[in-house]
Amino acid sequence: MPSSESHSLNPFRVLVRHRNFRLFWLGQTASLIGTWMQSTAQGWLALELTNDPFLVTVVYASSSLPVAILTLYGGVVADRRDRLRLVTVAQACLLAQAVLLWWLAWSGHVTIGWLIGLALASGIVNAFEIPARQSLLIELVGREDLIDAIALNSSGFNLARIIGPAVGGLVIARAGLAAAFGANAVSYLAVLAGLLMIRLPPRTVSAPQGSPFAVLREGLGYIRRTPEVWALLRLVAVYAVCGAPYLALMPVIARETLRGGASTYGWLLGAVGTGAILAALALALLSSRTSRGQLLRYGALAFPILLIAFSFSRSFALSAALLVAVGFSMIVTNAVANGLLQTTTPDALRGRVMAAYSWVFVGVGPVIGPYVAGAVAKHAGAPVAVGIGAAITLAYGTWAFAARPELRSL
């Protein structure tokens, strides 16, 4: 018992024990810093080109629309093909997209149409890359270290969320938008180098047989018949649709509500990342003292309450402080839900289940949520849009944990 407890309190041990995961984590974290720089620059560029909060959210949501349409099929592909190869090819395609965006911005040919088109292109690639990457994790570390690897993956993602927007805001202010896009293109070389150095044994799980439709139907049938998985996915869906759009509206809040510039926007996103990485690093300690079901409940209820408070703030300092807490509760909710889904699901179905998770969290949620929030923001202001979405999120979370025994029993 002591050894397992010690293990659970030290998620960094996974980097030492697993060379493949170490290569994956270092390359992905470096690349994600560039991705967050691009995201910061893209949101600000959309606002400069259109001066329209709705179109800002359209650009943000366009990268998720193909995920909503294609990622369930992407899960079928992930369960049938070499996941490492799928992720490597996808990252090379994203490098090409980043280079094109840099050239358009540098040459002065960028338009809102190009921004939306390239966001759609990246979404098509992500529809196949995300389920493959999510289900690849267990191949890199094994089932025993999966939870620690998920926590560390969240740490890397949110370390990039801190560094990327902050550096991106400074780069935009001093060197222009094109420089931020160029930095992202270069960062893809790091993840590609790491992926090419990974060595995995052949997969032992048999690929599912039958037509893609039959294979997909098998995965969806498992989700619907498994109460815990079904309840978790519904909770994630509501939080993605109603709670997460505050990120899409952040450029508007930075400029219109807090009267700041690109650096203000970067610091606000960095505040979210600060809270998120603190949560990712604290998860091992928290889970040693509290059940994962309780952690999920605490995080899921704290997140919308904090967002409601953020929607009333008109002070940069208060907004940043609240966003640290928002980021903390957000990553607790997301990481615990992700870990519960992965450890509940059999190996042969993991690609399809994680594709369903990606479909609601990266696909449907970021498509529907930002469009609705952007429309509300256009007529009533961004803070009102954030507050309404958070109130709906809180109402559903309160009901779900009171009425669904499968959530309480996790």
Image (tube, grey):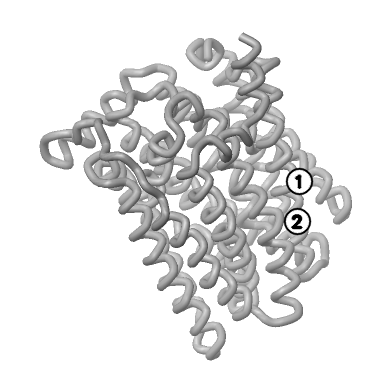
Residues at circles 2 and 1 in contact by the CB criterion of under 8 Å: yes
**What amino acid is at disc 1?**
Leu
Quadrant where the N terminus sits is top right
The residue where tag 2 is placed is 268
Identify which residue is drawn at 71% across, 48% down.
272
| Residue drawn at 38 percent across, 36 percent down | 139
Q: Position of residue 86 (x, y in %)?
A: 32, 53
Vertical placement of residue 327 versus 66, above or below: above
Q: Is residue 248 above or below residue 388?
A: below
Q: Which residue is mark 1?
A: 323
Horizontal relation, residue 177 to residue 405: left or right: right
Q: Is residue 150 visible?
A: no
Distance from disc 2 to disc 1, alpha carbons, whole Å, reads: 7 Å
Where does the image place residue 368, in percent across and percent down from the top left?
Answer: 47, 49
Q: Is residue 159 above or below residue 53?
A: above
Depth check: give the residue in front, 93 or 205: 205
Secondary structure, mark 1, is helix
